[in-house]
Amino acid sequence: MFVAAGAAVTALAVSERKRPLRRRTKVTAPRTAANLALGASCAAVIQAVEEPLCRAIARSNEAQNAGFAGSFPRRLRLLAGLAAMDYGFYLWHVATHKVPLLWRFHRVHHVDPDLDMSTAVRFHTLDMLVSLPWRLAQVRLSGVGPKALTLWRHFFNASILFHHANLCLSGRWDDRLSWLLTTPEMHGVHHSAARAERDSNWSSGFSIWDRLHGTLRNDVTQGDLTIGLDDPCANEDIAFVPALAAPFRPDDQLDQS
């Protein structure tokens, strides 16, 4: 499994280099290094804290037939649990933009001016702890068991790498896939510096949630997008150490999403 996952990630990385969706604006290496460093710190928190707690709740769900998935016939519980987890993340994503305290941490993700695969893991370390109560409630209310939780994590991780990729899909494949999944063009709009464009396309897995809530925008040309944020500290906060300090800046120095 690890070999297959590594091969898929490598193929996606090569593809976004060969078929870029947007022109890069910054030197790649320093920005990517900062993104990966932030991602590594987040992964450590997830493995040490979030994963064990979520797995314990998932085992309890399975034993008690608890949560949303538990109300379905056994053959449908896996699908119901996956859908509930994905919808829960849609709601959390909206909250990270609308609640000022949550935005302070999520802003670190949006500061990146060159959206690509490495942006998918660019989150503030404390963001993983701030989101923990929601994640635990999400697992409980969704009713996912251990198998469904593992499957959702694999799907979610693959999805965020894919839709953050700076990848131009052949033909009309981006449009076609966007009827079911979040795609690079779709998510590119969400990373726009223009708030009217950024406040759309919140889905991170299945794209149906944006369609159901009327938050889908597919009328923006990628070449017209300015990726990143328009605030006084945005350029400075790309680097690793300033990114860690960014949530604690005064309000007048931050883009207020």
Image (cartoon, helix red, strand yellow):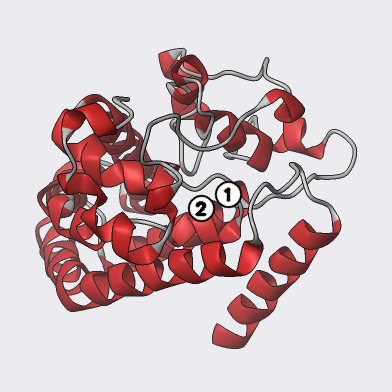
In this orientation, which residue lies closer to the viewer: 76 or 10? 10
Residue that appears at 79% across and 50% down: 20
Residue 248 marker: none
Residue designated by label 2: 160
Proximity of marks 1 and 2: CB atoms separated by less than 8 Å: yes
Residue 22 seen in this snapshot: yes
Q: In which quadrant will I find the N terminus?
A: bottom right
Residue at (56% x, 58% y) in the render: 161
Q: Is residue 199 left or right of residue 226?
A: left
Q: How many marks?
A: 2
Viewer-proximal residue among 156 and 79? 156
**Position above or below: 210 against 69:** above
Q: Residues within 10 Å of mark 2 (few under 14, many from 20)?
A: many
Residue under the point 51% across and 55% down: 119
Mark 2 element type: helix
In-image side of 81 versus 110 (left or right): left
Q: In the displayed structure, would residue 94 be above or below residue 143?
A: above
Position in image of residue 104 (x %, y %): 23, 40
Amino acid beneath label 1: His
In the rendering, at what x and y percent does residue 77 appear? 33, 50
Query: Residue at coordinates 44% horizontally, 27% vertically from top-left?
Result: 209
* Residue 39 spot, x, y in % from top left: 39, 67
Is residue 79 shown to the viewer in this render?
A: no
Q: Which mark is residue 164?
A: 1
Crowd class of label 1 (few under 14; some 14 to 19; many from 20; radius 10 Å): many
Residue 199 location (% of width, % of height): 42, 21
- Quadrant showing the C terminus: top left
Q: Secondary structure at mark 1?
A: helix
Amino acid type at mark 2: Ile
Q: CA distance from mark 1 to mark 2?
A: 6 Å
